[in-house]
Amino acid sequence: MNASKILQQLMQQAGGLKPGGQGRGGVDVKGMLEGLTRQLGGGASGQAPAGGSGLDVKSLLGGGAMGLLVGSKRGRKLGGKALKYGAVAAVGVLAWKAWQNSQAAKAGGVQAAGDAEGERVEVLEGELQERRSLELLQAMIMAARADGHIDAQERELIAQQIDALGADDELHRWVERQLSAPLDADALARQADSPQAAREMYLISVAVIDEQNPMERAWLDQLAKALELTPELAGELEHQAQQAG
């Protein structure tokens, strides 16, 4: 599979889609996704829709994948609650910072080194990077499904957009399985290969979740328990995600 390639693209696009992000700051997510839907439904010719944002089809596809995965709820994906793109773009750095802050609070301001905590996703290579990327993609998809409102058409659209980012056949089949698999926080948590991986899985889930939705809040609480995160650390991870925007 080529999960690491797909996750890296999503992280890069998230950095651009974040308000003020390089090259794509202030993007009209609603207009972009509406244009994407029209093009996918009507056989796009490769040109942006008339009167649209001027982005080409590849840009629309990439942004659409990010928009659906980070804000797949019906109200949010077309311009509702602000999407936490920054949390996706810097997930490893923010998860590590949250852990350091939580440790410093316990130790009276002294930050722990944490050599046994695991590496950030941004610095992993090879098979380790591929494994972590799968863990984080799985966490994103599960979080996107937490309110039960992704229907068959939306599943197909997400799969198409992941394909547009260059997913190979094996990853395509894996994504389709994840879109239909039972929501199981314990099974998801068992995929974490280190404490840092657990923190990243939780933080990237926060990026997708609307904490004001009771079903989605319940999923976060289940996941925090399954990942064995303390309430203080979970709260710090949520704070970092919110601050990243």
Image (cartoon, helix red, strand yellow):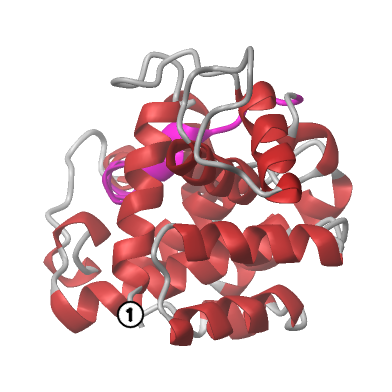
Q: In the figure, 210 relative to 233: above or below? A: above
Q: Position of residue 192 (x, y in %)?
A: 42, 77
Q: Is residue 186 magenta?
A: no
Camera-side residue: 174 or 147?
Answer: 174
Give the dominant element type of the magenta stretch: helix, strand or loop: helix
The quarter of the rendered structure image containing the N terminus is: bottom left
Q: Residues within 10 Å of mark 1 (few under 14, many from 20)?
A: some
Camera-side residue: 178 or 232?
Answer: 178
Q: Quadrant of residue 131?
A: bottom left
Q: Position of residue 205 (x, y in %)?
A: 57, 54
Q: Position of residue 170 (x, y in %)?
A: 45, 87
Q: Is residue 89 magenta?
A: yes
Residue at image position (66%, 66%) is 142
Q: Quadrant of residue 238?
A: top right
Q: Secondary structure at mark 1?
A: helix
Residue at image position (87%, 47%) is 214
Q: How many marks?
A: 1
Identify the magenta region. Answer: 80-100
Q: In the figure, 21 relative to 5: above or below? A: above
Query: Which amino acid type corresponds to the residue marked 1 in the rendered image?
Result: Arg
Residue at image position (37%, 28%) is 16
- Residue 152 visible in the current orientation: yes
* Left or right of residue 91: residue 60: right
* Left or right of residue 233: residue 129: left
Q: In the figure, 2 relative to 71: above or below? A: below
Residue at image position (52%, 57%) is 202
- Residue 210 visible in the current orientation: no
Q: Position of residue 64 (x, y in %)?
A: 58, 42
- What residue did someone put label 1 on? 131
